[in-house]
Amino acid sequence: MEPLPQKLHRLWFTQNIRYLVYFLREFTGILIAIWVIHLILANFASVAFQTRGNNFIYPTIASRLFHALKYTNPIAFYAAIFHSLTWLYVMTKLSPIPLKGIWKIIAYTTLIAVWLVLSYFIWKFSFEFYARI
Amino acid sequence: MSNTIKIRVKRYAGEGQPTYDTFTIHFQEDITILDALQEIKEKNDGSLTFRWSCRMGICGSCGAMVNGKPVLMCETYLRDLPHTQSENPVTVEPLRNFPIVKDLVVDIDDGMEKFRQAMPYMDFAKNRQNEMKENPQTPRERKKLEQTSQCIKCMLCYSACPVYGMDKKFIGPAAGALAYRYQADTRELKSEKKKRTDSVIGKDGVWKCSFVGECSTVCPKKVDPALALQRLKVMGAMRIVGL
């Protein structure tokens, strides 16, 4: 009599809401990574076009990659928000001091505020950096 | 309002594919799933097989999937289940991620073997400079390991962990919690703690945990194995940089 192995169901992440949130959290990380690669390639193609002059390949690649960004930008934006909010919530579970009830909410909102402030300064810095170059 | 309730149980007799049998029993406010199964075994089908022992949520024997959620059957009351007093049956299945031996009995050997990797022991002899010397611990120090020391090895966390479901080599939540219990113990020498850290941060160790968090949600003793695994990751990172 052999024990019957049990494999993880293919749609295991649909079994409850917490699995689904986790799955979306990880999946949005992939979307962000794809967007970053796209952005790097678009910048690379643009720089290559500028340094190589009127090479007929690079303007086409650069313009197509940058054109596609207007579709991937909003996807990456919402993916980044969902990814960040879910990870910030997970961070409240890692506190060295056990947080319960209202304190967990306060910690979560504080983390969101810190994230927004940091995001603003990073955006401002990168905006000024690109404006200068 | 009906005074009966239907219990749908997954059956497996050691060969072929599992099937489901539905039993109808008299509903009572104060009976648990375990009580219901015992009544079924006594009155309906004596071949129904399941593990149980203490009936009070301390031994960890009676773990099973009830309506898709891993629970201790002795702590799950019929009155708290959403399908009570309706035509939809309560579904009882064996714990996920473990091979089924018979009916609701699963082979948990693999999970138990993971505890070895946690090195769940302390060498008190090395703490003593003189024979019969005590190893005092303050209440505050004791409190650090109190939560993870509550684990009853019921394996509900392994059943809930999709990482373990996909990769049986993963050390798993309970072994991680057990390892943290000893890492947090102040009575042990740091050299011994380093050995344990090396043991749990290996190839199939704590780094495979991607913080799903379901293990902590289902734990009947509120051990929070997910937090223990993240703390072990911090210890592992410090170990890698030589701290």
Image (spheres, rainbow, N blue to C red):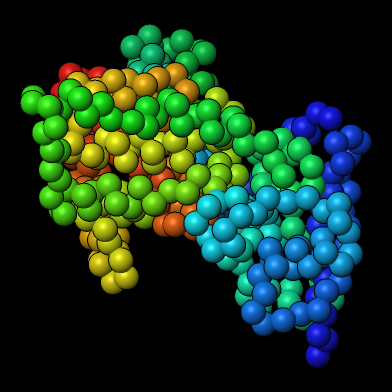
**Residue B240 occupies quadrant:** top left
In the picture provided, is B156 more to the left or to the right than B66? left
Residue A64 coordinates in the image, percent (x, y): 53, 28
The answer to whether residue A11 is visible is no
Residue A55's place in the image compared with A70, above or below, is above
Residue A11's place in the image compared with B40, above or below, is above
Taking the view exactly as shown, the residue that stands out farthest to the left is B130
Task: Give the quadrant of the C terminus of chain A.
Answer: top left
Residue at image position (22%, 29%) is B124
Task: Give the quadrant of the N terminus of chain A.
Answer: top right
In the picture provided, is B64 more to the left or to the right than A46? right
Taking the view exactly as shown, the residue that stands out farthest to the right is B16
Residue at image position (61%, 55%) is B53
Taking the view exactly as shown, the residue that stands out farthest to the bottom is B1
Number of dots carrying numbers:
0
The answer to whether residue A51 is visible is yes
Residue A128 coordinates in the image, percent (x, y): 18, 38
Residue at image position (25%, 44%) is A123
In the picture provided, is B3 more to the left or to the right than A129? right
In the picture provided, is A71 more to the left or to the right than B37? left
Q: Nearer the viewer, residue B181 or B169?
A: B181
Residue A27 coordinates in the image, percent (x, y): 53, 41
Residue B129 coordinates in the image, percent (x, y): 8, 24
**Residue B235 occupies quadrant:** top left
Q: Nearer the viewer, residue A73 or B49?
A: B49
Residue at image position (47%, 49%) is B152
